[in-house]
Image (tube, helix red, strand yellow):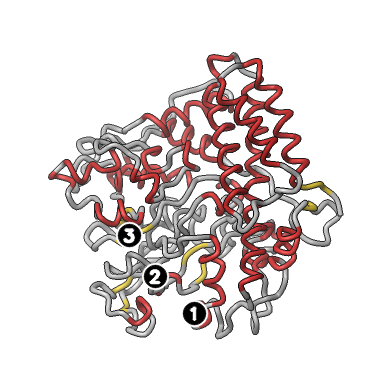
Amino acid sequence: MGSSSGLAASSNEAAFPVGVETLRQVKPRTSTGLTQAELVERGRQLFEYETFGGNGRTCATCHPPAHNFTLDPNYIAKLPPDDPLFVAESDPALAKLENPYMLRRYALILENVDGFHVPGVLRGIPHVLGLGLSIKPGTAFPLADMTGWSGDGAPGDGSLRSFAIGAVAQHMTKSLARVPGRDFRVPSDDELDALLAYQLALGQQELLDVEPGEDEVLKFYDASVERGMVLFDSPLHDGAKTSCFACHYKAGANDEDVALGGHNTNFATGTNRLRSAPACLVPADGGFGKGSPHLLDSKGACGGRTPSGGLAYGDDQFNVPSLVAAAATPPYFHNNAAATLEDAIAFYASDTFKQSPAGEGHPFRLDKAAISDIAAFLRAVNAYENVVEATRYLDQSLALPHQRSKPLRDLALAQVTTALAVLAEHRPTPLFAATHAAEALRAAQTKLRSGNPALLAPAKIDLERARSLMAASGA
């Protein structure tokens, strides 16, 4: 999954390269009587195991639950040679489904975002966490949801529910002819409902209180994190006088117009013109919309390098991702151009951003210390949310018979493992080292790994202790 596309001639229809006949094959609903929990579980099974009659890939091939629902080069390197991710290397009919070198080396997957008749672009694989808080478009946006890397990733009405249709046709097909009914099976309406329910159940469900000055703002027990939270909300963008908070309200994906409930937005920040982008020498990525193709100028494209495919479709805009899970899901930007969290933050102090439409001629004022503190804040937010989510999964698990609760226990364990890794990444000292939050997390991890149902409730106590050692609520 994780595809995006431009707009069709109609102003209210996405132009992801899926034909009308494919859309027409979505079958009407037949299932009845499922509870919400049952629908989510049905969606999980489809997400992890259903190949839709295609080449062996599932949604989880590119969005593995045990790896924060995304891929990076290190994870890919550990996969066996016969993993469905590498089907383009073994099936001659799918030789051009991917660019194997770019997939293995940079975790970039081929997307025909401007139509199957146009060479595809290479994009990173976004996680699918917290989608319920990150896909609401502004009133002027012509599609139902903001999906993919540029807001237009789904066919039909552009909704997250329709997203799976495009993903199956793009990534799971048996041949590049992509004939529905022969090369893949189009998901039914029931399956789309279940997949939607599952995706919306993943990740963050409520915004964190990380707005300085609020009565219930989290007080983090780490000075670097506290400084980073203040910097995140400070007007560091000279000229524009905006902050990180303006586009990432409470570290999420929406703007701070809370009167309207906040909405996700597209911006042209120049990330598709970065010299460091590994996909810089393949067809250029124009972001949102099909539009008229334009040639990226030699000064902007690839930092002055001459790309072999500088012709780009779209308006160079990409949508705002949530930062709550950012620390655990590198590399960054739509093209994986930033390897580390610090690299991604530093980009906004660069000339590339300054010269972009979103930069308005001004970079963010970020020195090395500020970058480090903002990174600490984002890592703390990530780990704190991991604990929130792990606790939620444990609560749900405890309400089920042991034999049915394993998927939830696995998700809880993955969250705890992620939190530990994120806290340890901070240099020179792991975050919350003074409060020993990691010790409580490791205790929970050990209990969850045991598989002993009697240890689930004690593991939850460990998680509650870990959260109290990271932050307290209230000014």
Q: Which mark is residue 122?
A: 3
Q: Amino acid at mark 2?
A: Ser
Callout count: 3
Secondary structure category for the residue under label 1? loop
Residue 366 visible to the viewer: yes
Secondary structure category for the residue under label 2? loop
- Mark 2 packing: few (<14 Cα in 10 Å), some, or many (20+)? some
Q: Which residue is mark 2?
A: 276
Q: Which residue is mark 1?
A: 356
- Farthest left residue? 92
Q: Is residue 296 left or right of residue 464?
A: left
Q: CA distance from mark 3 to mark 2?
A: 14 Å
**Residue 25 placement (x, y as % from top left):** 31, 38
- Mark 3 packing: few (<14 Cα in 10 Å), some, or many (20+)? many
Q: Judge by depth and name the residue closer to the eye, 72 or 449.
A: 449
Q: Amino acid at mark 3?
A: Leu
Judge depth for marks 3 and 2 and give the one in front: 2
Q: Residue at x 81, y 46 (%)?
A: 472
Above or below residue 219? Residue 419 is above
Q: Residue at x 24, y 57 (%)?
A: 116
The C terminus, quarter of image: bottom right
Above or below residue 287? Residue 394 is above
Residue 154 visible to the viewer: no
